[in-house]
Structures are given as C-alpha cells and as structure tokens.
Amino acid sequence: MAEHFAQLSDPHLTSLESVQARDLINKRALGYLSWRRRRRHEHSPQVLAALQDDLASNAPGNQPLAQLLVTGDLTHIGLPDEFQQARAWLEGLGKPTDIALVPGNHDACVSAPWDSTFALWRPYMAADGDSGAAADPIEFPTLRVRGGIAFLGVSTGVPKAPLMATGTAGTAQIKRLRELLLATKKRGLFRVVYLHHCPARGREKWRKRLTDAALFQDMLEVNGAELVVHGHGHRRHYTQLSTRDGATPVIAVPSASALALHGADMAQYNVFSVQRVDKGWKLDVNARVYEPASGAFLPDESCSIELLRQHAGD
C-alpha cells in the first residue's frame, strides 16, 4: 500500500504592518524595505487559506498524510512577533507530530534569542522521542519515522551578512546526517531528506547557494537517499544525483503563497506517494498549483519515478 506525504515551502505568511523602527536594525532594515516594495504584494494570505483548504479536502486515496514537510521561510525578517504569527498558522495546519519543519534563511535573518523565536516552533521541529523543554535548542538533523518512511530534517538557516541569502549545514550536521542515513537504510526505510537550501552544486545563484553544497552532495552520493526536497528559490526544478544506492531525485517546490508577480513561479505544493515494489520503490509526485481565476489549488504536473534499490534483507 502506498504511503503519502506533502511538502510546502517559503510561505512568507507574516505581516510587518506593526513593525517599529527600533526593530529594524542591520539586515532586518533591508528585509523590511523588500517587504514594503515587493514581498507584501507577492505573498498572499488568501492563497495560503486556499492551500489549507486544499490540504484538508484532497488527501490522496482518502488517507491522511504521513507528514507535511514545511521547508522554511515562514517569516520575512525573523522578528519575535513573526514567530508568534507563524506558530498560530502552524497550529491551524495540524498537530506538531503531523508537521515537520526546518527553518529558512529569512527565519534566521539575524541572531536572536531562542526563547522568543525558534522556541515557539520547537514542537514542529522536534525529532521523534525528543522530550526537551522549550528552552532547549533542537539538534539537527532530526529524524521522524512514519510507517516505512524516514524523514530527515536538516537546518541550513543561519544568520548571514546583508544582501546574502546563503545557507550552511555545517560539518557536524552533515556527519550526523550520514549516520542517520546509514541507520535508516539498514531498517529498509524510504529516506526523505528535507531542507531549505538546494544541496546540489551550481543550481542556485552565488548569494543564494548552500555554502557547503559540495560537501553535502558528496556525502549524499556516498551514503544515498531516496529523495531530497527543498525550497528557497521560489521556482520548481528537478535535479538527479547519482549515489551508491542509485538515482536520487532532488525536487524544489515554489513558494506556497506566491502570485508570480515578479518572475517567480505561481504558488504550489507537492504531494508524494511512495510504494515498495520488487525492484525498489515507486515514487509518484503530484503538483498542486494555485489558479487565481478559481481561487483554488488544482492538479498540475505529475510524474512517476522508479527508484531501483536492493531492500534490506534481500
């Protein structure tokens, strides 16, 4: 039987209407100007409301999603009030055990106290079995197992210099991800790595890249994964990595709230279906794209991918 999950990214769901001048220091001032000129028109709360309705009414095969992956940039400039707004939005989407979140570069715009920012999202970022207090930072990568699927969350959102939208995973996190990939492979699980920035070399502009993409990609090629999903670029694209276990799709999803006013793709989220087959795995990818005329998300492109693998125990 197939198992289903979905991914959305870059909702930029918050409003900065009540921001005070004292809040706009350093890089946040540039982000606020970008919001005033462009982003507040590009990212629509009406689109996000339609997305929430669509998620509730279009479960594949009338089965609940194993997880909803949210790959960062819920905020614009990472203010504590934005984290509060995003927490309320997440609560409207579902329970923390059903929603798996990693931060993006906008969420980590500048260094900020944990207890007034990411602590508010902690239940949605936590790994299975994590009973830490709100004051305890999350150790990434995280692991959640649902049925036959392992969801491995990587944080690439770290404060960077003004005008830079890069991300970094870091050698310690990449090392731990390697260990988790090997452990979940031994369990015969379908391994999904989710993060904000693109881990494939050369796919993003220099100022938007993952700074350690080469190290990250090398690790994936040696240790394998069945699927990698990310956001960040506000465009959909497909890359394929050759790994020791076979081909690994790397799939980018556009912003979940975008109206495609400035060259980016229209709002979209992806629904994935995974089924174990004799030769490995069958992965179905179904895009749902916002249609302004109807004010709803509708089916768009879909594809089926056969991932040749030797299952554990074979």
Image (cartoon, rainbow, N blue to C red):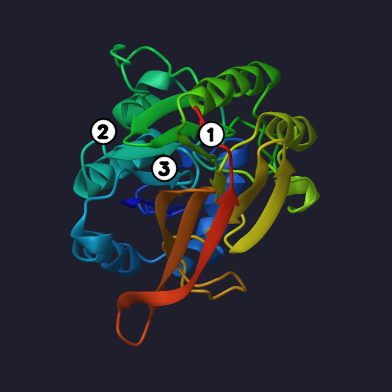
Kind of residue indicated by mark 2: Thr
Label whose residue precedes the other's in the sequence (3 or 1): 3
User: Against 47, is 156 above or below?
Assistant: above
Kind of residue indicated by mark 3: Gln
Residue behind mark 2: 97
The reply to whether discs 3 and 2 touch (Cβ–Cβ < 8 Å) is: no
Query: 105 or 102, which lies in front?
Result: 102
Instruction: Return the x and y of residue 158 as percentages of the image width and height.
Output: 60, 30
Residue behind mark 3: 20
Residue behind mark 1: 108
The reply to whether discs 3 and 1 touch (Cβ–Cβ < 8 Å) is: no
Q: Could you tell whether 220 is left or right of 95 in the image?
A: right
Q: How crowded is mark 3: few (under 14 residues within 10 Å), some or many (20 or more)?
A: few
Instruction: Return the x and y of residue 302 as percentages of the image width and height.
Output: 48, 71
Can the viewer see residue 232 in this picture?
Answer: no
Residues at marks 3 and 1, CA–CA distance in whole angstroms: 19 Å
Element on which disc 2 rests: loop
Camera-side mark, 3 or 2 = 2
Residue 87 lies in quadrant? top left
Camera-side mark, 3 or 1 = 1
Element on which disc 1 rests: loop
Which residue sits at x=62%, y=74%?
A: 263
Query: 213 or 294, which lies in front?
Result: 213
Instruction: Return the x and y of residue 170 as percentages of the image width and height.
Output: 67, 23
Can the viewer see residue 314 in this picture?
Answer: yes
Which residue sits at x=26%, y=66%?
A: 54
Camera-side mark, 2 or 1 = 2
